[in-house]
Image (cartoon, rainbow, N blue to C red):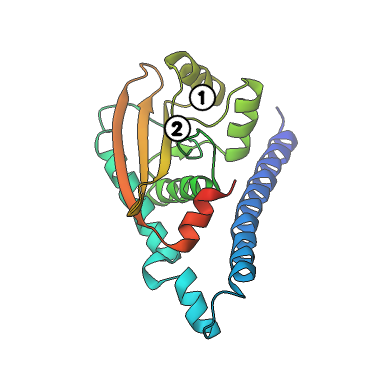
């Protein structure tokens, strides 16, 4: 592959990542407007009071950033003895093995935390989705050892991070696991609980 082809391929990856990023945040913004519309007739309070019910100080962007950093910190503590250079991060699924917007959002925050801390290289999401489609697979927390190895071989990765988001009543439970692709062994796992705000619940219910 010559230099021009390498530059062209890199630009295509950047474009795909940008589209994924924009699409995810468009979903989140769309849900905000849905909440506003549905609440217009039933919530009789000042606009500032309404937004406080949606975005509380302890569940803003910084809140989710901290939660994802905690998850990554716990995951990487048990990974030192493994030779992991690159990981695949899957969108988190719910109890029905589907990807809600909250699962997609939390996986993107996990990717940010991994790259920010320079723990591992991370497969680009567009490549991950193309690979899953080619292998006739979907994001899941119930991959077989063979499926994990096929994904790892295609993406040249040494580990995979998958997980689940669940509404447990008092809170929303976020569980992730780091799995060694060669052996199928769970290297480490981590759990964080999110405040069960109205906005988080809506993100969990929409796909």
Q: Residue at x 25, y 34 (%)?
A: 78
Label placed on residue 156: 1
* SS of the residue under disc 1: loop
Q: Is residue 62 left or right of residue 108?
A: left
Q: Is residue 111 left or right of residue 184?
A: right
Q: Is residue 142 above or below residue 39?
A: above
What is the residue that sits farthest to the front in this orientation?
42
**Residue 23 image position (x, y, % from top left):** 66, 52
Task: Tell which of 21 and 35 is nearer to you.
Answer: 35
Q: Residue at x 61, y 70 (%)?
A: 36
* SS of the residue under disc 2: strand
Instruction: Please tell me which of labels 1 and 2 falls first in the chain.
Output: 2
Which quadrant: the N terminus?
A: top right
| The quadrant where residue 137 appears | top right
What is the residue that sits farthest to the top in this orientation?
146
Q: Is residue 3 above or below residue 26?
A: above
Q: Which residue is mark 2?
A: 86
Please rate how many residues cluster around mark 2, counting C-alpha atoms within 10 Å: few if below 14, some from 14 to 19, many from 20: some
Distance in Å between CA atoms under marks 1 and 2 = 8 Å
Q: Residue at x 65, y 57 (%)?
A: 26
What is the residue that sits farthest to the bottom in this orientation?
46
Q: Residue at x 46, y 57 (%)?
A: 200
**Residue 178 image position (x, y, % from top left):** 36, 32
Task: Tell which of 140 and 124 is nearer to you.
Answer: 140
**Residue 12 image position (x, y, % from top left):** 71, 41
For the residues bearing labels 1 and 2, Cβ distance under 8 angstroms:
yes
């Amino acid at each position: 592959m010559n230099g021009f082809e390498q530059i062209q391929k890199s630009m295509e990856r950047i474009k795909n990542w940008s589209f994924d990023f924009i699409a995810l945040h468009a979903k989140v913004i769309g849900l905000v407007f849905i909440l506003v519309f549905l609440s217009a007739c039933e919530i009789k309070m000042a606009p500032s009071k309404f937004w406080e019910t949606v975005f509380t100080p302890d569940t803003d962007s910084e809140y989710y950033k901290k939660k994802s950093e905690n998850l990554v910190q716990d995951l990487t503590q048990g990974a030192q003895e493994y030779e992991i250079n690159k990981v695949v991060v899957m969108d988190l699924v719910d109890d029905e093995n589907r990807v809600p917007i909250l699962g997609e959002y939390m996986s993107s925050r996990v990717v940010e935390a991994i790259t920010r801390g320079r723990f591992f290289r991370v497969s680009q999401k567009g490549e991950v989705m193309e690979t899953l489609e080619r292998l006739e697979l979907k994001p899941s927390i119930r991959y077989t050892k063979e499926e994990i190895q096929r994904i790892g071989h295609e993406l040249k990765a040494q580990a995979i991070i998958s997980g689940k988001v669940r509404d447990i009543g008092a809170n929303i439970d976020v569980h992730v696991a780091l799995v060694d692709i060669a052996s199928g062994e769970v290297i480490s796992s981590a759990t964080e609980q999110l405040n069960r705000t109205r906005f988080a619940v809506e993100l969990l219910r929409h796909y």
